[in-house]
Structures are given as structure tokens and as C-alpha cells.
Amino acid sequence: MNFPLFQPIQAEMEAMNNRYREILSCKDENIGRYVDYVLEKLGKQIRPAIVFLSAAICGKITENTYQTALALEMLHASSLIHDDVVDEGTIRRNAPSVNAAFGNQKAVLIGDYLLSKCINMVVNAKDEKLLKTISDLAQAMTEGELLQLSNKEVNQLSKEVYFKMIERKTALLFAACFQLGARSAQISESETEKWQQIGLKFGLFFQICDDLSDFDSKVKTLKDSHKDIIEHKITLPLVLALQNCNQIEKKSLLNLYINHHGTEEEIAAIVEKVKEKGGTDATLQCIKEKKTEIDKFLNSFSTTQYQKCFLQLTNYMLKTVE
């Protein structure tokens, strides 16, 4: 992990990744090469970083903090591999996705391998709260993926359905990072609940930033450019743009979005129409509103290098899409 914003927890993240490699290690060379491929593409690891930052702000980083960060990162990595199979994604972090590299059958099993390692580690840690959270998250994230697929088929592109979907697919995992990270510092349940609620807002903020970045060809920091459009995924800019269309315009945009073949001309036409109908501006306003709530919460704590790091993260994310 080499993300400048996380310098205050660099040592903790490196220690976690060493343990991550140990947990996933396998003596069988055939399995090992798949694991090595996953470990080569760890990304920015924002979720485990949030676990460490939440714990540090609330008091101190403990052994439970490490176990929590590891479990949630393994769950996330497993879900990404499975999502790419479902979405037929071929690029992840500017490199071939696991399914593109090894095929769908092996990708599903690699994802299962990570999930089984995650569950095994949590069971051995004898942390019932963490085990229940992992179990609930796995169910919720699967429900979110099913919601996305179902609504892709019937075209129920409402704002309510969108937020229900991303809460399950993305926001609940971030909420767990905030909540369990704070909990690992042994704070009260009432205070932990506050961290869970702000974590849910952060998860929505993160996903909406991710959505908006797809509509700007210059933005390649948070994700691969136009990946959601290419995969015909429901995102907030599209949903909000459709609200401002008359029936003819809505039908035309939906037809283009659902049936395009990923050509530069088609993607450019989609981006232009969504911007023209106010989808990107309205999405940016939503992002700013959520950032204000998150920053207000973080500013209620004493100024430390960890608190500053968190605030810099939200600033960084906003700047990538403004």
C-alpha cells in the first residue's frame, strides 16, 4: 500500500499486509499463483485504512483492529472478484481482472477461497461481533448485486432503488469499517453506533464519487474510466438525468445506455446527454452535501494526524470529481 494520504498509519498497513500474505499463503504452487495475482493488485486499501484511522481517533490501535481490518479487506477482495465475473468485467485497477486472467470458473473459486480464509480467521479470533458482521455483510452485498441485476433487466431506474442498491453493495461495508474500527479501541456502544451511522454516509459518498468519476474522461484516479457505462450499470448521474427527461428523451437515453456497444462515439453521446440533463451537476451537489455531514462529524474530535488524514481523504475524493 502506497497512498500518501495514509502516511500516519503506514507502519500499521504494512504490518497488516504482511499478515494478509501469511493468511492467504498456500504451499500448493497452482493455488499460490492465483493468490499471488490477487496480492499484486491490492489497490489503495481505503477500507482497512479507515479501520485503523477510526481506531486511532477513538483511542488506540489494538490487536482487534488488525483482525477487523484483515477480515473486511478479505471480504471486499472476494466480492470484487465475484462482481467482475457477474458483470463480465475485464479490467480491474488498470490490469486484467482475475476472471479475465484465469477464466470465470477459477475466478469464482479464487473469490470463494478468499472468503473462506476470511471466515476461518474470524472464527479463530473468537470475535462473535465480527463474525456476525461478516456474515450479515456477505448477505447484504449479495442482495445488492442481485438488486442491480434485477433492476437492469426491468429498468426500474428510480433514485430510491439506486440508494437501496448501493447501501447494500458498498455503503454497509464502509459502515462496518467505521463501526468496528472504533469498537476495536474499546469505546462505548453508543459512540460506536455514531461511527456506524457516519460510516454509512461515507459509503454513499464514496460510491457517488465513484459514479460521477465515470462521466469524466479525465478522471482515472478512483476507477477505470467509463467502466460503469461500458458495463451498463445503474449510477446516480444517469438516474438524476432521467428525472429531467420527457418521455421521448427518457426512452432515447435508456435505449442508448442499455444497448450501446461501448464505442467511443456512444459513450461520448451518453456522457453529453447526462450532463445536458443535469445528472452530473445534481450528483456533485449530493456529494458535497454528504461530505459536509462527514466532515462535521470528524471535526467534533480533537485535531490529530489521524483526524487530519480522514479529512484529507474526503477532500481528495471531492477534488477528483469537481
Image: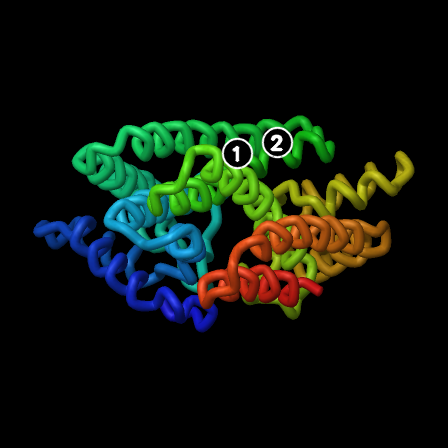
**98 on left or right of 162:** left
The quarter of the picture where the N terminus appears is bottom left
- For marks 1 and 2, give the CA distance: 7 Å
Residue at 83% in and 51% down: 278
24 or 127, nearer to the observer = 127
Mark 2 residue element = helix
Which residue is denoted by mark 2 in the rendering? 164
Above or below — where is 4 with respect to 321? Answer: below
Residue in view at x 21 percent, y 40 percent: 121
Q: Which residue lies under the disc numbered 1?
A: 168
Q: Amino acid at mark 1?
A: Arg
Left or right of residue 49: residue 172: right
Position of residue 151 measured from the top left corner of the image (x, y, whole percent): 63, 29
Residue 53 in the image, given as x and y percentages of width and height? 42, 56
The amino acid type found where label 2 is placed reads: Lys
Residues marked 1 and 2 touching at CB (< 8 Å): yes
Q: Is residue 160 visible?
A: yes
Residue 197 picture quarter? top right
Q: By what rule are the colours in the image chosen?
A: rainbow
